[in-house]
Amino acid sequence: MGIEICVEGLTKSFGHQVIWQDVSLTLPAGEVSVMLGPSGTGKSVFLKTLVGLLKPERGSVKVAGRDITRLREHDLYEVRKLFGVLFQDGALFGSMNLYDNIAFPLREHTRKSESEIKRIVLEKMDMVGLIGAEGKLPGEISGGMRKRAGLARALVLNPEIILFDEPDSGLDPVRVAYLNQLIVDLNAQIDATFLIVTHDIASARQVPDNIGLLFRRELVMFGPRAKLLASDEPVVRQFLNGRMQGPIGMAEEKDAAQVEQELAQIDEGGSADALTPRLLPSPGITRPPRWEAIARREAELHGTGVTGT
Amino acid sequence: MRLSPTGALRHSGNLFAMALDVVRTLPRRPFQAREFIQQAWFVASVTILPTALVSIPFGAVIALQIGSLTRQLGAQSFSGAASVLAVLREASPIVTALLIAGAGGTAICADLGARKIRDEIDAMQVLGIDPIHRLVVPRVLASMVVAVLLNGLVSVVGVAGGYFFNVVLQHGTPGAYLASFTTLAQLSDLWAAEIKALVFGAIAAIVASYKGLTAQGGPKGVGDAVNQSVVITFMLLFVTNFVMTAVYFQVVPQRG
């Protein structure tokens, strides 16, 4: 059914360098959220903190009523079974083939028979479109396949929460589109809570229910997709539109005067962005009530043409 | 990596913390038998040949040194006794340690380091599996077992090499060499050497695992980790060797 993650006052630093501070947000159960941010703002660090791989200096991460940041090592391993994580390069075990990789969590944590493991593994491989590649080693396949295999492995224990670390990095636009569709389909099928960490704006506009933006060591904004896409906040607007004009500079930040000037230029242009249509589950997939409602809303917003896509 | 005054202390602390974790995780079931056998086979396969090849000249050097020394002192009949003692007590644990650290430890460190930077270790933790239990404990045990066995190999090959050089090349008398075999050395020397090898194997594997699991900064980080693991292991091994030898002389009464 999905589990809510409640993050409060989270602060993380390495030595004297503060990565981000006072991050508070709630990832609603069963919804898709995206965490955006320019490169080097600690998005991956945020994701690793959520699963307890890194310990924050302050704050709490509550999952199913338990605070991840204060759990003992042993309990942490128990709570982690609720999570599925897709790492940047899939993080497959290089010495095992894809089948063994995906079967690994089942063999470690369950007493299932080999035939039952086979059924589950093949089902998940089918879900991510990897049937036929069971015997391949991770070194022999493309980056896109590695990501999908990593996703299949993350799915195999039926997690309540799935975290994606830059699912689109290093993939071509077509593969990114397929992967986004896969994420939406999965959400409609398994109802887990999704968090996607990325800097790909196109995905962020199409896929999620909620968007958050990390910048300048803090969470600038977190909220429903429509609110962020329509936001007047300069950082949010700059990032979601991929513009050079705005507070985010090449190296770090720009000085205030320059930002003012640039923002004035944009306002003269007066560009009103239309709300990007949302990506909906593929036609073959049975939509749960939540997605039915989303589809109806999208149809009202954009006319009838988009529901099928 | 930035230098800080407490950095070395922190790393030593973490290293010992991990050693304790390994001890604590040791009895946890299920025991990773498959991984243990694979690792033992792997460590053995990378160390057996170099160990044998190193211990022949090592035995020979000792035989040459002792041969000329005993001739000068007029104590040729003791050359067998002295070279057995030297090989058994010092040479074989040290050769074993060097090879286990140099060939086995580096391989373990590089393997775990590569897994670390590919996020495999993180992925494992997220899948609810403790890498200490799953990866480190089998490696430590494997390296300990292989070290003990290698120590036996080095002793045999070293003594045989010493015999060959003393008898064949320096024209010593085979009978005198064999007869004096047990005048100085005793069985407890062998046990002490095996215990040393056991401890050296554990140290090499723990340091290698620690360095591998804390590798960071991409492929270069793995290279650095391997380098540091060899240096740290060697330093620890020689200090441990000294302490263990000193304790041994206090505890076990010597012959002669």
Image (cartoon, rainbow, N blue to C red):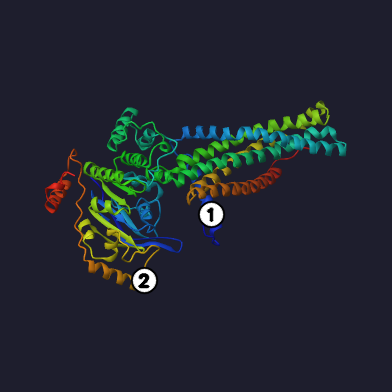
User: Residue A106: x and y, percent?
Assistant: 35, 36
Q: Which quarter of the figure is the C terminus of chain B placed in? A: top right
Q: Residues within 10 Å of mark 2 (few under 14, many from 20)?
A: few
Q: Which one is nearer the viewer's eye here, A99 or B92? A: A99
Instruction: Tell me which amino acid carries mark 2.
Output: Asp
Q: Are marks 2 and 1 on the same chain?
A: no
Residue corresponding to mark 2:
A255
Q: Which one is nearer the viewer's eye here, A307 or A14? A: A307
Residue corresponding to mark 1:
B11
Q: Residue at x 54, y 45 (%)?
A: B208
Residue, far top: B175
Let me know if residue A28 appears in the view. Answer: no
Work out how far the residue at label 2 is from the one at label 1, CA to CA, in angstroms: 40 Å
Disc 1 chain ID: B
Circles 2 and 1 in contact, beta carbons < 8 Å: no
User: Residue A288: x and y, percent?
Assistant: 17, 43
Let me know if residue A56 appears in the view. Answer: yes
**Occupied quadrant, residue B94:** top right
Residue, far front: A269
Compared with A222, B254 (above or below) is above
Q: Residue at x 36, y 38 (%)?
A: A105
User: Residue B241: x and y, percent?
Assistant: 66, 45
Instruction: Tell me which amino acid carries mark 1.
Output: His
Q: Residues within 10 Å of mark 1 (few under 14, many from 20)?
A: few
Disc 2 chain ID: A
Which tag is nearer the camera, tag 2 or tag 1?
2
